[in-house]
Image (tube, rainbow, N blue to C red):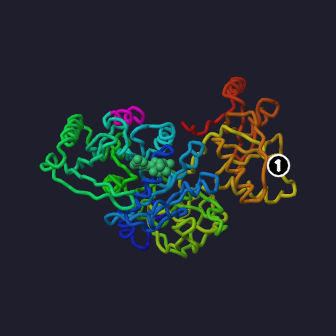
Amino acid sequence: MSTSPAGPDPAGAADVEREAARRRTTAVISHPDAGKSTLTEALALHAHALRQAGHVHGKGGRAGVVTDWQDMEKSRGISISSAVLQLHHRGHVVNVVDTPGHADFSEDTYRALTAVDAVVMLVDAARGMEAQTRKLFGVCRHRGLPVITVVNKWDRPGREALELLDEVEEVTGMRPTPLTWPVGVAGDFRGLLERGSGDYVRYTRAPGGATLAEEHRFPADRAEAAEPDAWPRALEEHELLREIGADHDEAEFLAGRSTPVLFTAAVANIGVAQVLDALVDVAPAPHRHGTADGGAVEVGDRFTAQVFKTQTGMNPAHRDRLAFARVRSGRFRRGMTVTDARTGRPLVLKHVQTVFGADRQTVDDAWPGDVIGLVNAKHVRVGDTLHDGSAVSFPPLPVFAPERFRVVRPLDLAQGKQFRQGLAELDSEGVVRLLTSTRRGEGEPVLAAVGDLQFDVVRHRMEHEFRSPVVLDELPYSVARVVDAEAEQLLRADRAAEVAAARDGTLFALFSDVWRVRAFARAHPEVRLDELVATD
Ligand code: GDP
């Protein structure tokens, strides 16, 4: 029996549960250049790509299944789009949600990660845990997501495998439990020891990586004869790992205390099938999700979904607005009427797509774990819960602490309408936060961001998409706290601070630095100054 307010899906909870059980929803996080696009393409090559999201590029002769979100982002001069690639592997559906690679978009990454159940953390074999990987991992830790680690570029000279494991453990605090182990040192990648079966899988690289690398499987007792130089060492290290207990443990992994590790050369399609296998075998299926009132929604309940991203102009050919929602429970059917829990408004889901960007397809059915793109759902905002049946709300998405502030004005005063509409749209997408300073008033809007690149996105999109080029003037603040009206009164007289209201009424007090915050707190111990989520 379900205890959720939504109640079981009338279409049949058993069907929904079966579909949910064969879904895996994940995202790849990595430092730029570690091979995220290459791995994503390789995953698509190995799996049957059901639907692809994002702008589809043909690159390097890889026909048909190439997705290069970053190219799309580059061509738009920005890096924010989250799209979804849907793959089919061994009777399972694997949804790969794209995340922005740059730490300036941590908040956007965080939102995209609310749509996934596990994360693939990609590490360059030579560079190890780079800065952005560390930051993005921190974001995953906030979400309590299980992490699968993939060490890529093993075909190139790099570090010792055991040394890389140490670094992963030191930085993340998770115990590395390799599922595959490289045969041959970095730069001389012969194949993989599959730790589950003990088999040796030898690869012969296909020229250019255009097709799958040829693979030959040897049972453990024939592996040494096949690979006399490299196998004994791999075997010895595998046994050492076993002795120290570095074997996969599902409960530890789901609790975020251990991370399965795989080795790949994504560019040569080596070790990639094992990554798909790991997603199917160890990554969690969609599961119950907590609601704002402390209850929970089971996957078999009536349809619920949460919006994690909205965006206009993803494709110049379709100048419309898409809201991306992750299905949490129940079956989505095209044409169904749902309610937006925030506004109470009904919404008929007629125009729904799973392929975003250049190539789109209408979706008729979707299940827990899937991401659907609602076309022109104008009033839907990031964080909104959509539900069928009685009211359910998922917890709001956290607001990351902005650290950069700018006053924005239109270059051309005659463009007032486009200026206001553009800013309102960018605010509702969460590209930046649009604030009205109590001191400056409506005429001088203030933009708040986590990282400077967000302002570049604003400049670019205001000029190219909303046809209202803007000028941004820096404000001397670096810290924001959420305050109430009482604090706002007190801060009015303070020349070193400023209070600004978000569109939902939240008041942000902006201070030049934490010393000012502390001085104010000391002078007014009765006033609440709420901190927001830090990015690290
Ligand atoms: P992203 O920025 O993380 O998406 O990285 P890309 O997928 O664009 O890859 C960055 C560069 O590394 C490209 O030149 C790729 O061809 C290369 N690359 C990716 N994976 C591998 C690999 O396994 N081996 C080698 N040698 N190069 C790789």
Does residue 239 appear anywhere in the picture? yes
In this rendering, the count of numbered labels is 1
* Residue 533 occupies quadrant: top right
Q: What's the amino acid at mark 1?
A: Glu
Q: Residue furthest left?
A: 221
- Asked whether, in this view, residue 271 is left or right of residue 515, the answer is left
Residue 288: image location, x then y, percent:
42, 56
Q: Residues within 10 Å of mark 1 (few under 14, many from 20)?
A: few
Residue that badge 1 annotates: 442
> Which stretch appears magenta?
163-173
Does residue 28 appear anywhere in the picture? no
Q: Which residue is pictured at 36% across the width and 53% down the height?
A: 283
Residue 510: image location, x then y, percent:
72, 36
Residue 78: image location, x then y, percent:
63, 52
- Secondary structure mostly seen in the magenta stretch: helix
* Residue 188 occupies quadrant: top left
